Image (spheres, rainbow, N blue to C red):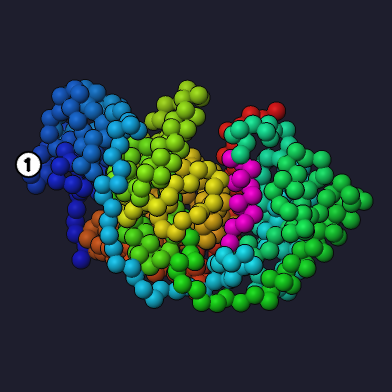
Amino acid sequence: MKKNIQLIKIHPEDNVKIVVNTDGIKQGTRLEDGIIIKENIPQGHKVALRDFKKGDKIIRYANVIAYAAEDITQGAWINENNVRLPESPKLENLEFGTNIKKYEPLEGYTFEGYKNEDGSVGVKNLLAIFTCVQCVEGVINKAIEKVKNNILRNYPNVDGIVPINHNYGCGVAINSPDAKIPIQTLKNLSQNPNFGDLLVLSLGCEKLEANKLFKNEDKKTIILQKESGFEEMQDTIISAIKSSLKKLNRRKRKEFPLSELVVGVQCGGSDSFSGITANPAVGYAVDLLVQAGASVIFSEVSEVRDGLNLIAPRIKDKKVAKKLKSEIAWYDDYLNSGDVDRDANPTPGNKKGGLVNIVEKSLGSIQKSGTLEIVDVLGPGEKLNNRGLNFGATPASDFICGTLQLAAGINLQVFTTGRGTPYGLAAAPVIKVSSRSELKEKWKDLIDINAGRIINGEVTIEEVGKEIFNYVIEVASGEKITWADKWKIENRLCLFNPAPVT
């Protein structure tokens, strides 16, 4: 049953409430507990439940999200302008492995997928075309356009053709220590399980030669500088594509245990409700997926850094703890080398949606990871090695994070949003979960699941979590199609390259 809720409090220890009303809450409104609102406060923003002196702790999610930068009166609006950022948790002070949750496996869950020659299982039947350097992108795009317009319809069992285009390969310091990140990203991208076959396109003089990534005898490599002009290039490429399409068209879906499924979770365009509705619901689904045998990757260093005190107790063992500290320390140094404040992460939209700083954003973002133990930490561009819940140490950029999750081996992605984003991936289905009902109503044909119903009591976090869990299996099996896939919304891949460009 729907309830008329004006404000919501997450935890008994919190000393702020979040405004629920679409139109915000007006100055002079008297709350049930006698608090009088001192000024107009927008939806998603925070109301002070008591008087704060300068330096007092402001608590949400039972954690300190900020300190009062000035005296704040009860009923006032707490926003980015009257708070001060707390320090990040010190890596040396973290306590690891103190909250490892035991669980009973969920038996019998399966999905319908495609078996690959390397033993992996995909949820799409795609042809990938790997480009060794950006110079060849224009030529391959023209060939793919011709195939899609005139040929692909003859291969109804093929889901599509995905060019692995990128801005790497030449004019770069390929032997720099940090060059390992884009190089391993590209190599592992080419091995994503949703790619049933792979062609390689080289110019012929680039630094990132095909043999640095592949054994030549294993991959069909087309070298454009060996071709006699554009038309011959097109003929050679299209002939190779046709050969691959014939092979892929013979493939059929078969039943596999959920242990063959890898799911990525990510957020973008977050707001104050993300940590109340969409992210906790995804976290509940993550627990179910892991219990049923699937692997899950949650990511984004800058949106975990300030909540490491919540992550560390769930780290499996000392080896994983050491990897987490190493990856976080590397990223700290990376930001410091650019003289970047970690609070540069929240966007104007995040703040308009009620998030005052990176700490509040992080505490909400972490909710996507559920409650179970973290079995491994992946550096940027690394591939999944251990089944279960993994943390991918990636930047928070939607496009870089999505690219790195694909390189890690995800089959599909669950993406939460409060402000809204049409983001999509060609290589994997993206399930969009909204934090607010208003967004779902506005974007009926872009949002797959509305977690905003949780706010008014229409459904529970657990009910939406189960809905997401079931939807993941149905999308993985080809029984349902996401809105992003229906409209073929495909953002370009975006490499993370901290190495110098020459």
| Residue marked by disc 1 | 34
| Residue 223 can be seen in this image | yes
Left or right of 371: which side holds 415? right
Label the magenta part by its dominant secondary structure: helix
In this rendering, is residue 235 above or below 349? below
Find the residue positioned furthest to the right.
228
Which residue is drawn at the image coordinates 61% and 77% (left, top)? Answer: 252
Which residue is drawn at the image coordinates 68% and 71% (left, top)? Answer: 248
Which residue is drawn at the image coordinates 15% and 42% (left, top)? Answer: 13
- The amino acid sitting under disc 1 is Gly
Residue 194 quadrant: bottom right
In this rendering, is residue 218 above or below 107? above
Which residue is drawn at the image coordinates 30% and 47% (left, top)? Answer: 97
Residue 500 percent coordinates (x, y): 64, 29
Residue 43 percent coordinates (x, y): 28, 44
Question: Magenta span covers which residues?
Answer: 181-193
| Residue 363 can be seen in this image | no
Residue 231 quadrant: bottom right
